[in-house]
Image (cartoon, rainbow, N blue to C red):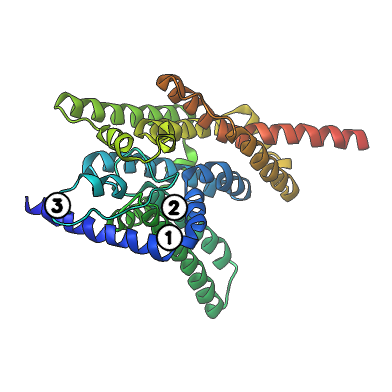
C-alpha cells in the first residue's frame, strides 16, 4: 500500500510535468512529434545502420546488436515492472478522487500499447547514440595530438549526446507517452547496454548458426516468459486493453506498437544481419578491393537509404495478427540483407560491366 501511494506521488508529479510542457510549449508540438519519430529504432535500421556499416563495418554491426538486445531487454523490463502510461493512468487512478482529473492531451503517437517503464524511445536513442558518439571519438582522437583539441572534441560530442537525450525525454513526456522517471530509466539502461557491447568482441566473429541460435533463444525466452506468467494468471498484454479503452482516437492505436510486434521486428533484423554477413554475396563484394573504395562505399550508402526508404513504405496487412507478425519479421530481415549484400552486389556488377565497356 505504501509503495502504491509512493508511485501515485511520482505519477502525480509526472502528470504535472506533462501538463506544464503541453500548456507552455504548445507551439512546439510539431517539433516534439518529429523528435519522437526520429528517436524510433526504425531510423537506426533504415538510416544509421547502412551509413555506419559501409563507413566502419564494426560500428554498424554493433549498432544492430545494441538496438536489438536493448529493445529485447526493454520488453522484458516492461513486462516485469508493469509501468503505467500518463494517458491512461490519469483516468484510472484514485489519486484525484478529491479533485478534478487533470486534462492530458493526446497525439497520434501517444497511444502506444505496451507498458511504460522504461521508455523504449529513450533507451533505444541512448544506446544507439552512445555507440555512434564513442565510435566518432575513437576515430577522431586516434589522429588528434593536441590535448586541448581532444578535450574540445570530447566535450562537444558528449554535449550533443546529452542534448539529444534531453530532447527525446521531453518529447516523450510532452506526448503523454511516458512519465519522467520512465525516460530517465530508459536513458540509463540504454547507456548500460551500449557500454557493455563496447567490450564484447564476439559479435564481430559470429557465424550464421550462432545468429540463428541467438534469435531463437531470444524469441523462446520472451514467449516462454509470457506463457509462464499467463499460467499463473498474469496477462502481460494488460496494457493493450488500457490503450484501447483510453485512447481518444481508435485510429491512433497501431498493432506495430504491441510487445510481440516489436519483438519479431527486432529479431528479424538480427537474423537478417546474420544471413547477410554469412552470405556469398557479401563475401565476394564487400571484402574485395572494390568494396574498400570510398566511392563504392558512398554509393552503397546512398542507394541503400533510397531503396530502404521505398521498402519501408510497404506496410504488412494488420487484419490477421499472425500474418502481420510473420511479414514484419521477413521485412525486418530483408533490411540488413539489402544494405549489406544485395545493394553492394548490384553496384559491384554494374560498375564492373561499365569498366569492361570502357576497356
The spot of residue 328 in percent (x, y) is: 48, 28
Q: Nearer the viewer, mark 2 or mark 3?
A: 3
Q: Secondary structure at mark 1?
A: helix
Which residue is located at x 17 percent, y 58 percent? Answer: 9
Query: Dot 2: what SS?
Result: helix
Circle 1 residues within 10 Å: few <14, some 14–19, many ≥20: many
Q: Residue at x 42, y 52 (%)?
A: 127
N-term-proximal mark, 2 vs 3: 3
Residue 237 horizontal side relative to residue 216, left or right = left
Residue 81: image x %, image y %? 22, 44
**How far separated are the C-alphas under marks 3 and 1?**
35 Å
The reply to whether callout 2 and callout 1 are in contact (CB within 8 Å) is yes
**Which mark identifies residue 61?**
none
Q: As drawn, is 19 to the left or to the right of 301? A: left
What crowding class fits label 2: few (fewer than 14 Cα within 10 Å), some (14-19), or many (20 or more)? Answer: many
What's the CA distance linking mark 2 and mark 1? 7 Å
Q: Nearer the viewer, residue 334 or 237?
A: 237
Identify residue for label 2: 125
What separation in Å lies between label 2 and label 3 (alpha carbons)?
A: 37 Å
Res 200 seen here:
yes
Quick one: 351 or 228, which is closer to the camera? 228
Secondary structure, mark 3, is loop
Check the image and report above or below for 216 versus 164: above
Taking the view exactly as shown, the residue that stands out farthest to the front is 100
Q: Earlier in the sequence, mark 3 or mark 1?
A: 3
Q: Residues within 10 Å of mark 3 (few under 14, many from 20)?
A: few
Q: Position of residue 108 (x, y in %)?
A: 45, 44
Q: Earlier in the sequence, mark 2 or mark 1?
A: 2
Residue 165, numbered circle: 1
The location of residue 331, given as percent across then percent down, is 53, 29
In the picture of the structure, the residue carrying the numbered disc 3 is 97
Amino acid at each position: 500500500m505504501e509503495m502504491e501511494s509512493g508511485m501515485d506521488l511520482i505519477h502525480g508529479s509526472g502528470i504535472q510535468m506533462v501538463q506544464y510542457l503541453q500548456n507552455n510549449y504548445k507551439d512546439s508540438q510539431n517539433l516534439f512529434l518529429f523528435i519522437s519519430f526520429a528517436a524510433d529504432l526504425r531510423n537506426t535500421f533504415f538510416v544509421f545502420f547502412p551509413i555506419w556499416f559501409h563507413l566502419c563495418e564494426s560500428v554498424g554491426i554493433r549498432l544492430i546488436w545494441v538496438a536489438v538486445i536493448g529493445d529485447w531487454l526493454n520488453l522484458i523490463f516492461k513486462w516485469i515492472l508493469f509501468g503505467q502510461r500518463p494517458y491512461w493512468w490519469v483516468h484510472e487512478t484514485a489519486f484525484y478522487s478529491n479533485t478534478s482529473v487533470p486534462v492530458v492531451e493526446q497525439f497520434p503517437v501517444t497511444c502506444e500499447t505496451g507498458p511504460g517503464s522504461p521508455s523504449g524511445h529513450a533507451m533505444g536513442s541512448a544506446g544507439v547514440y552512445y555507440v555512434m558518439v564513442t565510435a566518432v571519438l575513437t576515430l577522431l582522437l586516434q589522429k588528434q595530438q593536441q590535448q586541448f583539441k581532444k578535450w574540445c572534441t570530447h566535450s562537444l560530442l558528449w554535449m550533443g549526446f546529452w542534448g539529444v537525450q534531453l530532447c527525446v525525454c521531453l518529447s516523450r513526456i510532452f506526448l503523454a507517452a511516458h512519465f519522467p522517471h520512465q525516460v530517465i530509466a530508459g536513458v540509463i539502461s540504454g547507456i548500460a547496454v551500449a557500454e557493455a557491447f563496447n567490450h564484447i568482441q564476439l559479435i564481430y566473429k559470429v557465424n550464421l548458426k550462432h545468429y540463428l541460435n541467438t534469435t531463437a533463444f531470444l524469441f523462446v525466452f520472451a514467449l516462454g516468459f509470457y506463457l509462464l506468467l499467463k499460467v499463473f494468471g498474469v496477462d502481460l498484454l494488460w496494457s493493450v486493453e488500457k490503450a484501447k479503452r483510453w485512447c481518444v482516437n481508435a485510429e491512433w492505436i497501431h498493432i506495430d506498437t504491441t510487445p510481440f510486434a516489436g519483438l519479431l521486428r527486432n529479431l528479424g533484423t538480427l537474423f537478417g544481419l546474420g544471413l547477410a554477413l554469412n552470405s556469398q554475396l557479401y563475401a565476394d563484394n564487400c571484402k574485395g578491393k572494390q568494396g574498400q573504395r570510398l566511392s563504392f562505399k558512398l554509393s552503397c550508402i546512398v542507394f541503400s537509404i533510397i531503396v530502404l526508404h521505398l521498402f519501408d513504405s510497404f506496410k504488412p496487412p494488420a487484419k490477421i495478427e499472425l500474418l502481420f507478425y510473420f511479414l514484419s519479421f521477413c521485412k525486418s530481415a530483408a533490411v540488413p540483407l539489402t544494405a549489406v549484400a544485395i545493394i553492394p552486389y548490384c553496384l559491384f556488377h554494374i560498375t564492373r560491366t561499365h569498366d569492361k565497356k570502357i576497356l
